[in-house]
Image: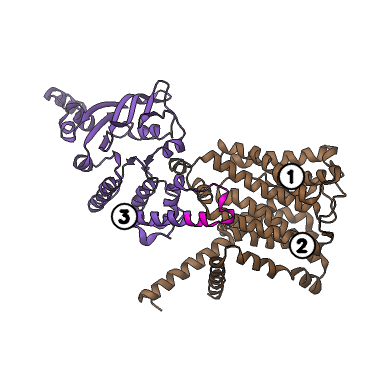
Chain colours: A brown, B purple
């Protein structure tokens, strides 16, 4: 009950601000999140600031994955491969060619977007589990490529990736880096909302619900499927570049295994597939759990795999779905009360 | 002038010839009925015209004088052919309004990347779209359900919504695949009233597949009868009704006394 009231209150507050100016709530959110590293390092230690950075990177990944899987309904398990492509692109461009972060970020986004086309093309013919297998193959082959090619890091990984800097300010520790990745993550969330509520987002959802009916309504199904894959790949590329430039500036193919993919899937399943905020909440919760269970490294896949199965059985809509249902139910009860035939 | 023409339209699924060299003209501004027993190829015809299936070689489909044979489904939709589905195929998790807005998709005036910063032009275009969709919702009588997920509507409301979604495309030709299936007689009248109202308001051409013969006889200007993928009759409703081949296709051949005796004898054995 209280949760619903709070949520409606927050929602209404944001709605009012948004009507004043569409970007206002987002600017306020950035301002509100500014003191977080100070609080975290004051209450705990610097490690938790690192965790906050990781969460921001995973928010980019899960929000991006939600666009292709949640909005457009295309099951892809190759997302970590695109993340790896973004990270390796940023690493090589900065160490071998001396590009700055401001060049490697768009380059990583662009290259990952191109790779997204490759991952997206199988979706023209494949659906569901078959598409999942195809994308899984593509994602894993990226990781194996990296692990056997010396130029891409192979078994030693790529190190010495410089920290980003702007106007003489270097983002060279976790607190400083937070001020770079937090706004990027918020921009990612904002863009995801912008896509969802536009005609493009409706086209994605229509394809998820019924491909044939979407085509009959004049929607170019292939174009929009590919667009969803490319957009989500660009998110992954962005996350990859953010990861590569984070201290210690080192990437290894072990950062892009299938375990990471399962973790990522768990985030959006827990948060609620198709809910933008769900992806964010999932990223926060799962990153923290992942971190807290690191001592039981060997049992993590078991833990995550079984919790995924349990979630799909008992809470397929995720946290986002539960909140949605609360709000809808509450609205219904309110409407009944206003109509005067409520029983309570 | 014929708005939709098919010439030598054929489609085989393996050995099954679902449509055989069908020649059909749907006159602009008319209400054209398409009837026939189950499995006679009515739905296949719809799927061929709207690009869900590819036709066999030699077939020609022309819409408003343009050859649209084997165009992609969205290309055909874009040209002004809207259809409903027998199984409705609504976007159940989207709201009623969003269902219509998807139908309106091709008329959205901004580029795919424009909504990112939501400039005023996008906000205005979205508002205009919503307003004109609300107008349509009030015609089909679903305005008060605008924000409800389509999956939560009743059966009759879903049929109306599928009609509305097709109308949101602002089509020239509206193809209805069994619009009245499963409705009570009163609701059938309501639905057909709305369809006729929409036709008058927007100058539509209608092509209707329907099993409820009363609907076909009352509303259609012209009726084509299919059986085993072939045209076995065409004309005004009253002509078709009395056509020998048509009656036979629906009810079976009339038996002679001899045949009846033989059949009884066989059954008794």
Q: CA distance from mark 3 to mark 1?
A: 51 Å
Residue B262: x and y in percent read 17, 24
Residue topped by disc 2: A178
Q: Residue at x 50, y 50 (%)?
A: A199
Numbered tag placed on residue A107 in the rendering: 1
| Residue A125 falls in image quadrant | top right
Residue A307 can be seen in this image:
no
Q: Is residue A11 above or below residue A185?
A: below
Q: Are tags 1 and 2 found on a single chain?
A: yes
Mark 2 residue element = helix
* Residue designated by label 3: B139
Instruction: Name above or below for residue A44 compared with residue A81.
Output: below
Q: Is residue B114 magenta?
A: yes
Q: Quadrant of the C terminus of chain B?
A: top left
Tag 2 subunit: A
Q: Which stretch is magenta?
A: B111-124
């Amino acid at each position: 009950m209280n949760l619903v009231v709070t949520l409606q209150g927050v929602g209404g507050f944001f709605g009012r601000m948004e009507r004043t100016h569409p970007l206002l709530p987002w600017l306020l959110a950035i301002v509100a999140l500014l003191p977080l590293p100070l609080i975290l390092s004051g209450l705990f230690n610097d490690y938790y600031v690192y965790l906050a950075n990781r969460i921001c990177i995973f928010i980019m990944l899960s929000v991006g994955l939600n666009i292709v899987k949640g909005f457009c309904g295309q099951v892809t398990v190759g997302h970590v491969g695109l993340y790896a492509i973004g990270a390796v692109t940023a690493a090589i461009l900065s160490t071998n060619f001396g590009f700055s972060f401001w060049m490697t970020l768009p380059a990583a986004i662009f290259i990952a977007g191109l790779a997204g086309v490759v991952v997206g093309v199988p979706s023209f013919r494949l659906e569901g589990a078959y598409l999942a297998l195809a994308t899984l193959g593509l994602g894993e082959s990226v990781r194996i490529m990296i692990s056997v090619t010396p130029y891409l890091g192979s078994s030693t990984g790529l190190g010495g990736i410089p920290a980003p800097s702007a106007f003489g300010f270097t983002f060279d520790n976790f607190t400083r880096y937070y001020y770079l990745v937090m706004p990027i993550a918020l921009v990612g969330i904002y863009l995801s909302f912008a896509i969802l509520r536009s005609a493009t987002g409706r086209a994605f959802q229509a394809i998820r619900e019924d491909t044939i009916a979407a085509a009959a309504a004049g929607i170019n199904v292939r174009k929009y499927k590919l667009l969803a894959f490319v957009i989500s790949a660009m998110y992954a590329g962005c996350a990859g570049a953010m990861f590569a430039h984070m201290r210690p500036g080192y990437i290894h193919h072990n950062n892009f295994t299938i375990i990471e993919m399962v973790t990522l899937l768990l985030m959006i399943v827990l948060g609620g597939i198709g809910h933008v905020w769900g992806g964010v909440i999932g990223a926060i919760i799962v990153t923290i759990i992942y971190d807290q269970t690191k001592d039981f490294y060997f049992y993590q896949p078991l833990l995550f795999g079984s919790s995924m199965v349990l979630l799909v059985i008992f809470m397929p809509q995720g946290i986002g779905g539960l909140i949605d249902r609360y709000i809808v139910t509450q609205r219904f009860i309110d409407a009944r009360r206003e109509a005067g035939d409520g029983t309570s | 002038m014929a708005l939709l023409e098919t010439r030598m339209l054929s489609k085989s699924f393996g050995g099954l010839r679902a449509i055989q060299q069908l020649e059909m003209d749907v006159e602009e501004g008319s209400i054209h009925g398409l009837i026939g027993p189950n499995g006679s190829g009515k739905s296949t015809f719809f799927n061929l015209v709207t690009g869900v299936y590819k036709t066999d070689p030699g077939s020609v489909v022309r819409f408003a004088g343009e050859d649209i044979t084997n165009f992609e489904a969205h290309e055909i939709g874009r040209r002004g052919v809207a259809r409903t589905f027998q199984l409705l195929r609504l976007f159940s998790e989207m709201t009623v309004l969003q269902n219509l807005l998807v139908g309106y998709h091709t008329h959205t005036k901004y580029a795919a990347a424009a909504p990112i910063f939501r400039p005023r032009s996008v906000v205005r275009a979205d508002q205009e779209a919503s307003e004109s969709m609300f107008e349509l919702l009030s015609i089909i009588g679903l305005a008060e359900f605008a924000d409800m997920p389509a999956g939560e509507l009743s059966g009759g409301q879903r049929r109306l919504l599928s009609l509305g979604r097709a109308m949101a495309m602002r089509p020239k030709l509206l193809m209805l695949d069994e619009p009245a299936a499963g409705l009570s007689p009163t609701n059938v009248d309501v639905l057909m009233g709305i369809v006729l109202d929409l036709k008058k308001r927007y100058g539509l051409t209608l092509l209707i597949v329907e099993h409820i013969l009363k609907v076909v006889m009352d509303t259609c200007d012209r009726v084509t009868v299919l059986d085993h993928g072939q045209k076995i009759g065409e004309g005004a409703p009253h002509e078709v009704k009395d056509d020998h081949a048509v009656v036979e296709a629906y009810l079976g051949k009339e038996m002679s006394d001899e045949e009846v005796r033989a059949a009884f004898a066989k059954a008794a054995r």
